[in-house]
Amino acid sequence: MPKNPRDEIDAQILAELRRNARISLAQLGGKVLLSRNAVRQRIERLERDGFINGYTIKESAGNGTPTVNAVLLIQRQDRMRGGDVIAGLRAIPEITTCDVVSGELDLIARVEAPDAARIQEIWRQVSEFPGVRDTTTALSLSTVIDRQTPR
């Protein structure tokens, strides 16, 4: 993927789509001073060039109640043969992302659950996985920046 969009209009299109991926082509064209068709062609090119890899939605917990977010910091007993831990994490639907990291930790998993009790259940479940040496859980108090993009 190239480092930067081709021009300022592409950058504006990307910024508007980050704000609202459901914006109509006509509305987007009005914001960047291009026709609907020109915006469509630019979006198609941005998709081909890898600047746009997908579109997503963010769901509430279902009944409008906010979710509780946490980060699980996981140390495995054996970094090279710890695939069972990752498989176990994949089976927990509330784990939204998991990264293998360098340094003291092995894995960082982001959890979104309906309440703190479910976070505690997940922590207990993960800490009992064979191959997990230690876990630390940090509950999110508030989110001040959210730039999650689909991969």
Image: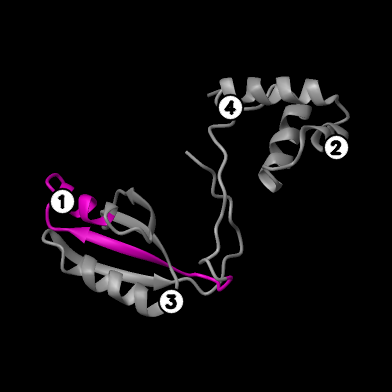
Instruction: Give the mark nearest the N terminus, 3 or 1.
Output: 1
- Residue highlighted by disc 1: 84
Label 2: few (<14), some (14–19) or many (≥20) C-alpha neighbours in 10 Å: few
- Residue highlighted by disc 4: 3
- Residue highlighted by disc 3: 115
Please provide percent x and percent y for residue 145. 60, 58
Per the model, the C-alpha gap separating discs 2 and 4 is 24 Å
Per the model, the C-alpha gap separating discs 3 and 1 is 27 Å
Residue type at mark 4: give it: Lys
Instruction: Give the mark nearest the N terminus, 2 or 1.
Output: 2
Q: Nearer the viewer, mark 2 or mark 4?
A: 2
Q: Nearer the viewer, mark 3 or mark 4?
A: 3
The question of residue 74 being in magenta is answered with yes
Residue type at mark 2: give it: Lys
- Magenta stretch bounds: 64-89
Q: Nearer the viewer, mark 4 or mark 1?
A: 1
Depicted 142 relative to depicted 106: above or below: below
Please provide percent x and percent y for residue 32. 84, 32
Please provide percent x and percent y for residue 124. 23, 73
Residue 65 lies left or right of residue 111; in this view the side is right
Q: Secondary structure at mark 3?
A: loop
The question of residue 112 being in magenta is answered with no
- Residue highlighted by disc 2: 31
